[in-house]
Amino acid sequence: MVTKMAIVAITRHGIEIARKIKQRLPEVEIYVPAKHNDGGNDVLWFTEQSTQLVGKLFKSYDALICIFSLGAVIRMVAPHLIDKKSDPAVVVIDDRANNVISALSGHIGGANALARLVASFLGAQPVITTAADVNETIAVDLVGREFNWTIENFENVTKVSAFMVNEEKIAIYQDAGERNWWHAPLPGNVTVVDSIDKIKSQEFKAGLMISDRLVLDQSVIDKSVIYRPKSLVVGIGLHWDTSKETIESGIDTVLKENGLSFQSIRNIASINRKAKVKGLEEFSAHYNIPVEIYEKDRLASVDVPNPSSTVQKFEGTPSVSEAASLLSSKGELVVPKQKFPPNLTLAVSRILH
C-alpha cells in the first residue's frame, strides 16, 4: 500500500468525505481551499489555484485522492505525467461518494488497491478498469511485488500483459523465490514449465521467468518478463579498510562467473568487527542492500565446507563468508568462498522457499 497520501477536496461535501477517510487513514493530509475554512486543524487550507496545488502534490506524494470530477483531475495532472513506474496513484471520488475511481497507476502505483480500500470505508463502488483486474488474471507488472521482486526487462511488460489479458498461451518458469505469489488456480492460458528452453516453444506467445540466474539466451529475453526474487545472500570476509570499489568488483565477478543476478541479492552478511567498515557501509548505501552482522561465536557454530585455520586464528571462527551467508539465508551454499587478494573473501547462499 502507498505510504504518503494527500486528499484534495473543493466542496463542503468533499470535506465531509475527506474527513471520513482520515478517520480510517489518519496519516493522510487533507487540502481544502481557504474559502471553506471552518477552523479545523485537521485540514491544510490553501489559497493558491487548485491546478497549481494538484501539480505540486502530484510530484511529492505517493497517492493523490481528488474529490471532484474525473475530467478536472485529468486536466490538472496531465502536464505532470511521466510513466507508470514513477507516477503516483490517483484516485477520484465524486461529490456524493457513490464511486471511487482508480484513475492512474492502478497496479504499480497502488491506485486499484487504494480505491477498493477507500470504497470500503465509504460504502461506495470501486471503479477499476485495468484489464488484468476485470479479467481476474495475472497482473504482469505486479508479480512478486509484495516480496520486493524486481523486473529486469520492464520494456517487455506491456507486450506480455497484452498476451495475458487476451488469453494467449504463456509459460511460467520458476527456480527461485517465494512460491506463493499467486493465490488462486492459474489462469487457463498459463502453463508451468520445468525448463527455460520450453519458453522458446512456438506453443507459447510469451513467458514469465522467476529466477536469480542470468539469462543469456536472447530469444528467451525477447519473449519474457524476467523477475528477480531476493533469493541470494552474499557472505563477506574483509578487513576494516576494504574499499567499496573492491567489494563491488568482487561481487560483480563472483556473480557473473557463476551466472547469478546482482538484482537478486537480498542482503550482505559478515562478521561484527566492533567498528564500522566504511567500504561496506558505502556499498550498502549505494545499492540499498542491507547488511546483517553476526558475532564470531554464532559464525563458529555453522558447519561449512571450507573452514580455515588462518581465519580461526585471526577472526575467532573458522569461517566468515560461508558461515555468514549460510546463517543469514538459512539455505544452501551455491558459491563456495572465493578469495580476492589482499583482503576480500566472498561466498553466496540461496534462500530456499
Image: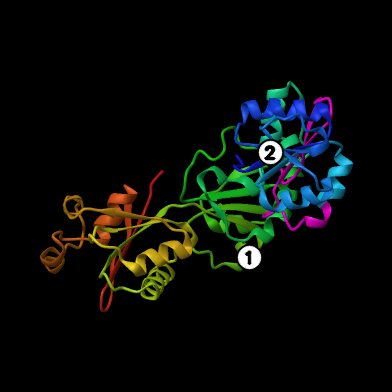
Q: Amino acid at mark 1?
A: Ser
Mark number, residue 137: 2
Instruction: Looking at the picture, tell me which residue is in the foreground, 112 or 45.
Output: 45
Mark with earlier residue (1, 2): 2
Q: Please give left or right for residue 160 compared with residue 66 in the image.
A: left
Q: In this orientation, which residue lies closer to the viewer: 105 or 54?
A: 54
Left or right: 46 with respect to 70? left
Between residues 152 and 170, which one lies in front from this camera angle?
152
Q: In the rendered view, how is the structure colored? A: rainbow
Horizontally, is 236 left or right of 33 in the view? left
Range shown magenta: 78-106
On the question of residue 175 being in view, the answer is yes
Q: Residue 257: where, in percent of width, then height? A: 40, 71
* Residue 219: mark: 1
Residue 34 as seen in the image, left or right of residue 346: right
Going 68% across and 38% down the picture, which residue do you hit?
A: 137
Structural distance between the alpha carbons of marks 1 and 2: 25 Å
Tell me, yes or no, whether the highlighted magenta stretch contains residue 190: no
Q: Nearer the viewer, residue 240 or 145?
A: 240
Q: Quadrant of the C terminus?
A: top left
User: Where 352 sits versus 268, above or below?
Assistant: above
The image quarter containing residue 181 is: top right
Place of residue 215 in the rendered image (x, y in percent of width and height, measured from the top left): 53, 64
Disc 2 marks a residue whose amino acid type is Thr
